[in-house]
Image: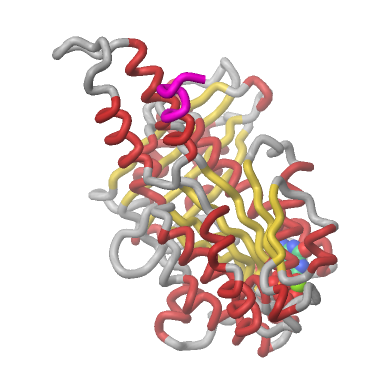
Amino acid sequence: MNNDKLDLSDLAKSRTSVRSRFNEIARQNVNSNSSANLDSDKYLSDLLKVLKIKSIVVGIGGAGNNTVSRMGDMGSEFIETININTDAHDLYYSNSNQKLLIGKETCNGLGSGNDPSVGTTAAEEDVNRLSQVLNADVVFLTFGLGGGTGTGAAPIVAREAKKNNATVVSFCSVPFSSEGTERSLRAKKGLEELLKYSDTLIPVPNDNLLRFNQRLPILTGFKIMDEVLIRSINEIINLINNCGLINIDYADVRRVIQKKGQYPSGLIGITESLGAEADLIKKARLALHNPLLEPDTKKVDNCIVSVSGDHQLSLSQIDKIISTVSSEIPEDASLKFGTSINPMLGSKIRIMALGRGPISPYVQAAIDGTEFPHSNISQL
Ligand SMILES: Nc1nc2c(ncn2[C@@H]2O[C@H](COP(=O)(O)OP(=O)(O)OP(=O)(O)O)[C@@H](O)[C@H]2O)c(=O)[nH]1
Ligand SMILES: [Mg+2]
């Protein structure tokens, strides 16, 4: 391997931000055969190698490990994953590319005993190893709030990822009310810490699953929640990986997922339509007003809508979706749309809305030190 290749692969793997990788390659290629005014293919191909946006998905604690394990079953095997836990048993039986047992001294591989401060100490014990593996441009965290490991360790994982210049996108479930007040108090404390280090923070309340089926067995509820979290993460990763194809580039995505202002926000919704006009309008609205999150869409200041369908996807269908979304968010909000052709969708049209601005009422409660919103399930 010549020195040029060695440098490039080191640079591609380096923990620096995509912008500094760009600057470095630009510097290294100063004397390439590009002329002063034109750039050579050699320069462009070098550039592409180091500009590839790297994302990793990190599952923390039992719920997070389960979610990541199920990602493979849902056809996301190409995504790089890391499972982190204080519980050796859960970690062993989970499925991820890399695994990290944290806090061997603190927990002896036996879990945190539902104590977030133990989860935090366990993560601090392994802070150097965490820092080494959190090597990506975008780090997705997924875990269940309310226990000890996810709640206590996730903020430390997020902090270390941010130290490495990553954009941190956190998806977490909020425990069912039926799991008790103590869990919900722990969840709120966890959010309080997490909001300091997340760019996008989307808590998904388990209770909202009951809107669709009040008799839902708890294990089925967890499975559905896993799927919600996986689909959300997958769609954002697809968007990042397909950047530059049609209309949306990584700068657009980064603008939406990066924190603006003091607190992290976020909105995501994914729906599918069979393409009739009335249904397209309904599903475009539903993607934006995701009933699992109930975001305040009047707070959206930046939004991406991605529409995928097979070769029949028409301009007028896309136009219907975009004009519907546009009428639901503030006039001065920036709205970008992208389209991609996916023959696997058959006759369905998939709509994904990703937005910045709305702060989850659960995050707001953690900021204000007030109670979590009450679920309205009994009134349904
Ligand atoms: N989506 C999903 N949520 C789960 C699952 N299991 C538990 N939860 C939720 O996640 C919360 C935290 O539970 P765990 O992830 O088991 O806790 P932990 O982070 O491992 O913490 P300790 O076991 O106390 O160290 C629970 O209160 C549930 O609301 C699961 O398999 N999938
Ligand atoms: Mg556990």
Q: Position of residue 30 (x, y in %)?
A: 22, 22
Q: What secondary structure characterizes most of the magenta part? A: helix
Residue at left offset 63%, top offset 40%: 79
Residue 248 vs 125, above or below: the answer is: above
Q: How many marks?
A: 0
**Image: magenta residue range:** 1-8
Q: Nearer the viewer, residue 312 or 35?
A: 35
Looking at the image, can residue 193 be seen? yes
Question: Residue 167, image x and y in percent?
Answer: 42, 53
Position of residue 27 relative to residue 304, above or below, is above
Nearest the viewer among 40 and 267 is: 40
x, y percent for residue 101: 71, 65
Q: Is residue 380 visible?
A: no
Residue 227 appears at what percent x and percent y?
Answer: 71, 51
Q: Residue at x 49, y 29 (%)?
A: 242
Q: In the image, 32: left or right of 36?
A: right
Q: Quadrant of the C terminus?
A: bottom right
Image point (69%, 81%), residue name: 106
User: From the viewer's perspective, is 122 left or right of 65?
Assistant: left
Ligand 1, what quadrant?
bottom right
Residue at image location 71% in from the left, 45% down from the top: 97
- Corner quadrant of residue 89: bottom right
Q: Nearer the viewer, residue 190 or 352?
A: 190
Q: Quick check: 225 above or below 44?
A: below
39 left or right, relative to 221 = left
On screen, residue 344 above or below 217: above
